[in-house]
């Protein structure tokens, strides 16, 4: 809901890559289901999935609104995903007395399964092309007017597409930066419950130091279950559970929702990223990381209460640091530049295309001036996030659907409502820490005398303001949030809650900045995006994949190690290897269940393995599927070379890291026993 | 002594600049006293200092080994410098009961003046050219052999130059990256005591948010006194105290010790800085800043104990973030590139010069591979710094002078001994915080499986190792340090102290890495440095200034505001302006004495002012001198545009920020009264 919330709950993965704007090479590509490159796959592997296979895995694939991917693996709505995708759920269901994140969780009976706040499971039921409808709505327009017209068209398509907003969700997806618009219709299940999760250390063995590295020894797996009307869902399709070791070179498919990539960006966008956004992001997040680490050290309670956020921050930081490295690697940026030069060369003289690169560059120049206020005008904290969403929703709901901000249209409101109203624990010290940090960074980057700093702080210091707002707000009470949500604008404006009043005070400036950004940046970018897509299709045909958009994609690849400084890295690890890697000190301390059950574990069981599939953050929890359509693992990480994949993909080095179904089944049988789940998984 | 110690006690300043490798323009330049550009100054201002004037200010100028500049301002050894240059001394002399940093300090009698640990005052008494001697020593050599031969020659020149190491210090300074070597002889005073300092808030009003910004409202001034044999020193020269407002456009000289600049670097060095060193430095320091902020919030004691370090970190971070911004500004880097192209063009075809740019580039390429281990093999903490210095000194002292590492030659040992043996308080929590931070960053950047990480950590976590080393070492006891210092190698090797043992364990690898760096980077850089200097002198004549080296320089300029986005910024602030800027919340809370004495202060007194002088970190505390040779202020900051001055200088925007003698006298008379000091300052 807020910047941080998104970060903490949006695991991301990267890669140091080769090709950017040109056509996809080798295993590169995060393909949409309506444009699967069957011919390329068949040419390469002598086999390719048919439409029935594709339909089946699509209907089995689950998007989790917390920012992850997953899949149905039983006829009773059982969902396989990563442990780190349910860490927030474990955390939200924990107390100082019952630390589910630390100990893990096994629901002995269906009625013990625990609701995951804010979590919703979504399955793609249809994809329709609405490019003409949306593009025609803004034809000939520019700037803010273009953005408004586009948003209005999208709101209408979504509202018309899903009259039943209780069980379906419609979402228009912008592909190729405005080159295509597709209407995705989802069957949704907003009651998602926790079924099984190992102890934290089994999933996070090696912690941040091993994150984005391989070999890994991680049981980053868990099970959820979708419910509807209080009963487990019977999905139309689910994947066959195949607890087996992967074979060298075997063909694998990853089906999931890569969050976002920037492979089709222009040079001016890369420059802005390298010169402005990344340096600021790494600096401010590093400080937050430090503040949190030190605050957590002061008590065991804070150690527990801060862990989920810390994991999220450290994951994000590793991603941003990896991106910084990629964009500061002259070889890498040279290839990005070459790809753009190639496309520009092929498009030269095409009057219909013109010079969208120049338009993007001008928009980025304008955005450089708006970036700092736009970024820092919104403070970070979950409680502030509630306040802002409540204020904005109250104001937006009073308008016709087609005039609302994108996050507040009829099609968007049900999930927002759920996220605001679901009960979850909040810790005042964490809220104050985030809020005072974000306010002090706003003052640092905008300057003391800047009007936006003065709007944010008044005469208070960041620490005083955070203390006052957090200690006096009632927004941690879900019942109070419900009153404000249902009471609408009248209730909001009558509220004496200091955070609501604060959000009301900031709102006009936030809107004004958004309008400026729409006028000078988003609008021009959308217009140029259409031209750039035209240029690409003209130059390379339509065998292209769009940048990731946290919508369903399929990538193909193979089980394969790689060569690191002349030394081969094997494609898999074994569960027994964990005992060799353990040092006794965190985060390399042996998971308790590994110590207890050492003699029972088959040490040769494949634990984690790597494939050449092209994925990125958001793909976490994606099923890794074999040729037969069975699931053989859940993707949970990338290797170190994959840091940079935001901008491109290198098939010789980039790897997806997967926890094997073989290891999960071993854990279900011996480490964190739930034999009834094994039975459920085995049933056809 | 350690990385951090240096940072925390080495205030630095920057600037967004124009000219790099070419000849100095306008007020640009940090000139050595043996090459003052009198003609340029006379041509520009119709007047220039004569030799007597220059000799007088040189003999009045003081270098403080804590990393600052200063000047004698009375015949009884009174020294003017910045408050932030004595903050560590105030801190070291504080206890929870008597917080001198917070409250300030006034010694009512000479015998109350307090020793500043590690601080030494140094006055340049002679400068001699030893270029031939040193360059001939390594003629025809390369790599590590070159470095060794050069260091041996320097050690000999220094030892021969200063047979009396009790009162003199000899230092060979490398100018133009190896193009010139000069022997600086100093009269030194190793007993420096605190005389007067205002309360912290008066000096740090506006805190980190206002640091490197102008207008400032800061009383960043203090007085020290040099002693010898228990008596105040009678310096041969001191500056006349002139408590007056500066005049618009008046000519000003800044005499002090700029720490380091990189204006003569080549493109490959700038690239390494931008792509590797700065991103890592900003990320790790930001995390340290966050850890410290959160740890300090847990108690008033920690708030006090951590403040000095936090100020140092925040100052450094602002510098590095400013440098990042400068090197990510295409206009700025374009000018740097153009300057190099110009010099290369003028040097083309000169066979004696060859292609030193290529040699530097090759050395930098090699250094990229060594950088991470070389940087992270030395953990950060004051206690570890003692251990490392004790171990290294014991091993080096056993060798002939000419074979020792540079920091351990006969000429270097007296100051090192003082720094190790001077008593100062150390706080275990701060030591653990630094140590566990630096070890965890080593693991993060080198990787878990790296042999250096394993050498640093063994099977312990960073937190466990830091806890064990800090809680068990005896090195916080100065008497124990003296025993080890005097006991030499035998005592070191017999010591059971875990930090000494740890430093002994790391030492061989630290030496091996240093050898690799000397062989592949420093050696080639020194060789190329000579060629680059030759190229510069051939192209632009010898009216050039060398990069800063924390040795005495003089810069000339004028009292002058500047234009900020079309709006003029006046050149000075008044003390009365403080009351308008105060908000009541830290760091904008009114200094207590300002509140108490409001009615007595003359609100129109010039507080801080700006000049066009070209300075950088290390210049803090430098006297700002008028045409008559009188001191009218102490430089303490740069404006926001001066962030970047590490690489170049822009006369239209870069400004030195100065606290006026007028304000200091007002403070001495009304705010923190010490009328006897006013009397001492007035006496001729």
Image (tube, coloured by chain):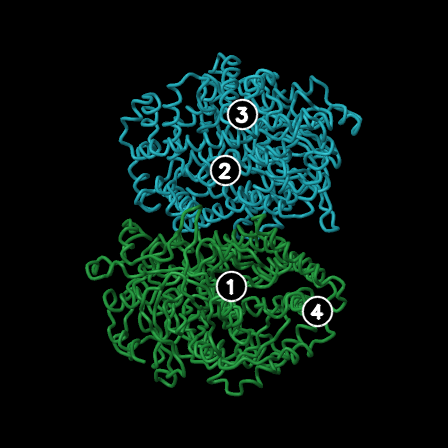
Chain colours: A green, B cyan
Residue wearing tag 2: B7
Say the numbered circle drawn on residue A227: none
The residue carrying pointer 3 sits among few (fewer than 14), some (14 to 19) or many (20 or more) residues within 10 Å by Cα, namely many
Q: Check contact, mark 4 vs mark 3: CB within 8 A.
A: no
Say whether mark 3 and mark 2 are on the same chain. yes
The numbered disc on residue A3 is 1
Per the image, label 4 sits on a secondary structure element best described as helix
Question: Dot 1, crowdedness within 10 Å: few (<14), some or many (≥20)?
Answer: some
Q: Which chain carries label 1?
A: A
Q: In which quarter of the image is the C terminus of chain A?
A: bottom left
The residue lying toward the viewer, choosing from A479 and A417, is: A417
The residue depicted at 58 percent of the width and 44 percent of the height is B274
Asked if B40 appears above or below A18 in the picture, the reply is: above
Q: Position of residue A470 (x, y in %)?
A: 45, 64
Q: Which picture quadrant has residue B429?
A: top left
Disc nearer the start of the sequence (4/1): 1
Q: Between marks 1 and 3, how big is the CA–CA gap?
A: 53 Å
Label 3, secondary structure: give it. loop
Eye-nearest disc, 1 or 3: 3
Q: Nearer the viewer, mark 4 or mark 1?
A: 4
| Residue occupied by mark 4 | A143
Res A317 seen here: no
Q: What element carries label 1?
A: helix
Chain at tag 3: B
Question: Marks 1 and 3: CB-CB under 8 Å?
Answer: no
Residue occupying the point 34% across, 59% down: A218
Counting from the top left corner in percent of width and height, residue A666 is at 27, 66
Q: Position of residue B488 (x, y in %)?
A: 33, 21
* Residue at the limit of the structure toward the left, as seen here: A599
B366 and B589: which is toward the camera: B366
Are tags 1 and 3 found on a single chain? no
């Amino acid at each position: 809901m807020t910047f941080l919330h998104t970060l903490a709950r949006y695991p991301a993965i990267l890669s140091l890559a080769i090709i950017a704007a040109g056509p996809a090479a080798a295993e590169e590509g995060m393909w949409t289901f309506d444009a699967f490159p069957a011919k390329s796959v068949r040419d390469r592997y002598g086999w390719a999935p048919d439409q029935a296979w594709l339909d089946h895995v699509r209907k089995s694939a689950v998007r989790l609104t917390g920012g992850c991917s997953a899949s149905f693996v039983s006829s009773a709505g059982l969902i396989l995903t990563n442990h780190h995708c349910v860490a927030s759920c474990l955390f939200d269901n924990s107390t100082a007395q019952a630390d589910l994140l630390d100990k893990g969780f096994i629901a002995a009976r269906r009625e013990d399964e625990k609701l995951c706040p804010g979590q919703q499971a979504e399955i793609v039921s249809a994809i329709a092309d609405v490019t003409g409808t949306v593009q025609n709505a803004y034809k000939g327009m520019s700037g803010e007017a273009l953005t408004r017209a586009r948003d209005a068209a999208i709101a209408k398509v979504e509202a018309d597409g899903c009259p039943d907003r209780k069980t379906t969700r419609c979402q228009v997806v912008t592909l190729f930066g405005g080159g295509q618009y597709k209407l995705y219709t989802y069957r949704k299940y907003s009651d998602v419950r926790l079924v099984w999760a190992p102890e934290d250390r089994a999933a996070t063995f090696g912690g941040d130091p091993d994150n984005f590295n391989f070999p890994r020894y991680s049981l980053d797996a868990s099970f959820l279950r979708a419910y509807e009307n209080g009963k487990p869902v019977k999905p139309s399709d689910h994947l066959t559970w195949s607890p087996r070791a992967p074979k060298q070179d075997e063909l694998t498919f990853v089906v999931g929702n890569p969050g976002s990539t920037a492979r089709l960006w222009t040079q001016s966008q890369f420059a802005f990223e390298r010169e402005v956004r990344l340096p600021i992001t790494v600096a401010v997040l590093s400080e937050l990381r430090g503040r949190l680490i030190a605050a957590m050290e002061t008590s065991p309670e804070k150690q527990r209460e801060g862990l989920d956020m810390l994991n999220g921050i450290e994951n994000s930081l590793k991603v941003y640091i990896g991106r910084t490295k990629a964009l500061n690697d002259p070889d890498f940026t040279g290839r990005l530049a070459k790809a753009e030069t190639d496309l520009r060369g092929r498009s030269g003289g095409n009057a219909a295309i013109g010079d969208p690169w120049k338009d993007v560059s001008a928009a980025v120049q304008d955005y450089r001036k708006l970036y700092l206020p736009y970024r820092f005008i919104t403070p970070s904290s979950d409680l502030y996030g509630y306040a802002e969403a409540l204020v904005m929703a109250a104001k937006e709901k009073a308008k016709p659907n087609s005039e609302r901000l994108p996050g507040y249209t009829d099609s968007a409101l049900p999930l927002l409502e759920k996220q605001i109203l679901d009960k979850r624990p909040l810790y005042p010290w964490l809220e104050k820490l985030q809020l005072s940090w974000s306010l002090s960074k706003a003052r640092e980057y905008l300057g003391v005398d800047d009007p936006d700093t003065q709007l944010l702080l008044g005469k208070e210091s960041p620490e005083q303001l955070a203390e006052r707002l957090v200690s006096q707000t009632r927004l941690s009470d879900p019942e109070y949030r419900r009153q404000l949500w249902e009471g609408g604008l009248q209730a909001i404006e009558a509220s004496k809650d200091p955070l609501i009043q604060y959000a009301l005070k900031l709102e006009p400036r936030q809107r004004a900045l958004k309008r400026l950004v729409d006028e000078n940046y988003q609008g021009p970018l959308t217009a140029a995006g259409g031209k750039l897509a035209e240029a690409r299709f003209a130059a390379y045909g339509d065998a292209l994949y769009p940048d990731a958009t946290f919508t369903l994609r399929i990538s193909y690849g193979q089980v394969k190690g790689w060569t690191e400084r002349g030394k081969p890295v094997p494609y898999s690890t074994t569960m027994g290897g964990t005992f060799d890697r353990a040092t006794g000190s965190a985060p390399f301390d042996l998971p308790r269940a590994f110590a207890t059950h050492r003699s029972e574990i088959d040490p040769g069981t494949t634990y984690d393995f790597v494939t050449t599939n092209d994925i990125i953050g958001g793909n976490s929890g994606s099923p890794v599927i074999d040729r037969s359509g069975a699931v053989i693992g859940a993707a949970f990480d990338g290797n170190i070379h994959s840091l940079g994949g935001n901008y491109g993909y290198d098939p010789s080095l980039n790897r997806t890291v997967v926890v094997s179904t073989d290891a999960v089944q071993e854990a279900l049988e011996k480490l964190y026993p739930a034999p009834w789940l094994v039975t459920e998984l085995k049933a056809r």
